[in-house]
Image: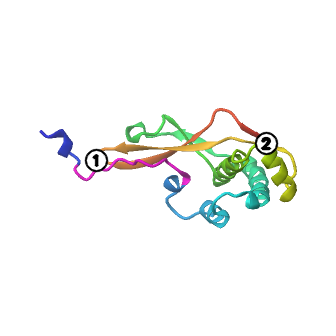
Amino acid sequence: MDEKNIFPDYEPKKDPDTIKDYLKRPTKVHDILREIGNPHISKFNNILTLFNKYQIKAKKNVGKYEKGNVAIGADSNQYYPSEEELLVSELGKMIVQITESYSKQQFKTLKLRYNIKSQNIRFVEISFRHVDVMGSGRFFYAEKASKETIVEF
């Protein structure tokens, strides 16, 4: 038996797993992230406003742990985040990306230019992973970080 030809059409996924992989169908998460586009300092206040709005909603609509199908790569106790939690995580990651794109001094100057108020934000990051199950397909899962990410700006 030629092991290399058991699944001749199999191609491994080589790019990072993202929310676009995880959420297959259109949702408000897609709509909001598409509207924002690529994170940029000029969009910071808008991203922050959305972050704060959805953080309040996420506290009221938390995800849940359910028994996962281990045979297709899920954790035995798999986490399924709410759309609000996904948005908070993605918006929080954008804020981190923007703040880390500049030195402290550059960001201080940009804060004045774009009227960004100093504050701390906290969020729990949701990451994504995939599992290729030969003969069944590719499955995507969300994972909730064990501790909060804190950003000071």
| Marks 1 and 2 close (CB-CB < 8 Å) | no
Q: For the residue carrying disc 1, how many other residues have a C-alpha within 10 Å: few (<14), some (14-19), or many (20+)?
A: few
Query: Which residue is drawn at the image coordinates 49% and 47% (left, top)?
Result: 16
In this rendering, is residue 132 above or below 50? above
Judging depth in this view, the residue of 62 and 141 nearest the camera is: 141
CA distance separating discs 1 and 2: 50 Å
Residue 153 visible within the image: no
Query: Which residue is drawn at the image coordinates 81% and 44% (left, top)?
Result: 105
How far from the left and from the top, in percent, is residue 47?
Answer: 74, 57
Residue 44 visible within the image: yes
Q: How is the image coloured?
A: rainbow
Q: Quadrant of the N terminus?
A: top left
Query: Which residue is drawn at the image coordinates 37% and 44% (left, top)?
Result: 132
Q: In which quarter of the image is the C terminus?
A: top right
What's the amino acid at mark 1? Gly
Residue 135 is labelled as: 1
How far from the left and from the top, in percent, is residue 144?
Answer: 61, 39
Q: Could you tell which of marks 1 and 2 lies nearer the N-terminus?
A: 2
Confirm whether the magenta stretch covers residue 82. Answer: no
Q: For the residue carrying disc 2, how many other residues have a C-alpha within 10 Å: few (<14), some (14-19), or many (20+)?
A: few
Query: Which residue is drawn at the image coordinates 49% and 48% (left, top)?
Result: 17
How far from the left and from the top, in percent, is residue 5?
Answer: 18, 46
Q: What stretch is highlighted in magenta?
A: 8-19
How far from the left and from the top, in percent, is residue 63?
Answer: 63, 46
Query: What residue did someone put label 2 on?
Result: 104
Judging depth in this view, the residue of 113 and 83 nearest the camera is: 113
